[in-house]
Image: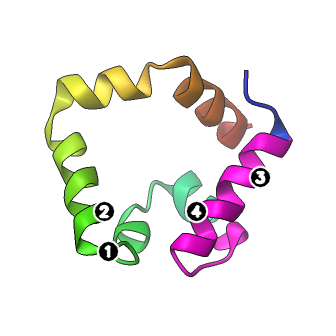
Amino acid sequence: MINNSEINNLLNGLSERLNTTPEQLRANLEKGNLDSVVSKMSSGQAKRLQKILDNPEQSEKILNSPQAQAIIKKLMG
């Protein structure tokens, strides 16, 4: 299971890559606002994310993974 420190490390790494703050990234993710996240990705990253989101089976598989469930649980409080 992913702990708070690991989630913070993940948010820090992602925010650095997306040129935003960890707090802004967390707030956008908690609100379900992926547009602001996607807009800061390279076109290749955005296309890969869109490909996953366009495939319900793949999205469900990823969202049901233990790692994703742990992140979702931590983000949702």
The kind of residue on which mark 3 rests is Asn
Q: Amino acid at mark 4?
A: Leu
Q: Secondary structure at mark 2?
A: helix
Q: Residue at x 30, y 62 (%)?
A: 45
> Which quadrant would residue 16 be assigned to in this image?
bottom right
Q: Marks 4 and 1, Cα distance to the nearest angstrom?
A: 13 Å
Q: What's the magenta region? A: 5-24
In the picture, which quadrant includes the C terminus?
Answer: top right
The tag on residue 14 is 4
Label the magenta part by its dominant secondary structure: helix
Characterize the local packing of mark 4: few (<14), some (14-19) or many (20 or more) Cα atoms within 10 angstroms.
some
> Of callouts 2 and 3, which one flags the residue occurring earlier in the amino acid sequence?
3
**Which residue is disc 3 drawn over?**
8
The earlier-in-sequence mark between 2 and 4 is: 4
Report the side of 11 relative to 32 (left or right). right
Q: Residue 4 at x, y = what percent?
A: 83, 40
Q: Which residue is mark 1?
A: 42
The crowd level at tag 3 (other Cα within 10 Å; few <14, some 14-19, many 20+) is some
Reading the chain from its start, which is encountered first: label 1 or label 3? Answer: 3
- The residue wearing badge 2 is 45
Look at the numbered discs 1 and 3 and tell me whether their residues touch, using CB distance below 8 Å: no
